[in-house]
Amino acid sequence: MSQPVIIRDAKPSDAKTILHFITELAIYEKEPDAVKTDEQAILDTLFSDGATAHSIICLEGDEPIGFAVYFYNYSTWLGKNGLYLEDLYVSPDSRGNGAGKAIMKHLANKAISNDCGRFEWVVLDWNKPAIDFYNSIGAKPQNEWIIYRLTGQELLDFAK
């Protein structure tokens, strides 16, 4: 019999675990070389004074099996903050036990308790298991929006 799934706020001592999950997620998303962060950067960005992003850890018993990183954004139309899920990952061996749903419910409750007007995230268009899961919980795709991004040299060049 499996142990219950527990969700808790991440602590600085979780930085190595978070990096491990980020790396596993990058491999799953077919971008294994995209991870440029390290434990120190995670400590600096998730746990320093003034950190704008936050993380939670999902455990089965004492064993970390997943994580999520989120931050608060703002809707000018609603005049309220929103909770934006940047990443959610559950280890392959632990999928199907309700961990992903528990993480999503935890974040939904965090959004409600912080008077957020929405809870949003993006999903890769080929990730059918995630899309099916999100549809099953009642989430609606926002197909009219296209994500744009500036990074690296393009960001530097534009900022000049």
Image (cartoon, rainbow, N blue to C red):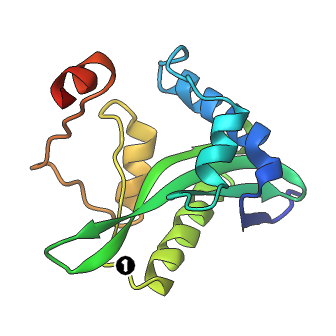
Relative to 2, say whether 88 is above or below: above
Looking at the rendering, which quadrant does residue 9 occupy?
bottom right
Residue 95 shows in the view: no
Which residue is drawn at the image coordinates 33% and 21% (left, top)? 152
Residue 59 in sight in this render: yes
Residue 99 place in picture, x, y as percent = 66, 57
Q: Residue at x 65, y 41 (%)?
A: 42
Q: How many marks?
A: 1
Q: Left of 55 or right of it: where is 123?
A: left
* Residue, far top: 33
- Comparing 33 with 2, the one in front is 33
- Residue 6 x %, y %: 76, 66
Examine the image and state in which quarter residue 21 appears: top right
Label 1 Cα neighbours within 10 Å, binned few <14 / some 14-19 / many ≥20: many
- In the picture, which quadrant includes the N terminus? bottom right
Label 1 element class:
loop
Residue, x 59% and y 43% (percent of image)? 89
Judge left or right: residue 120 versus residue 86: left
Q: Which residue is mark 1?
A: 116
For residue 44, which quarter of the picture? top right
Farthest residue to the left: give it. 144
Rendered location of residue 145, percent (x, y): 13, 48
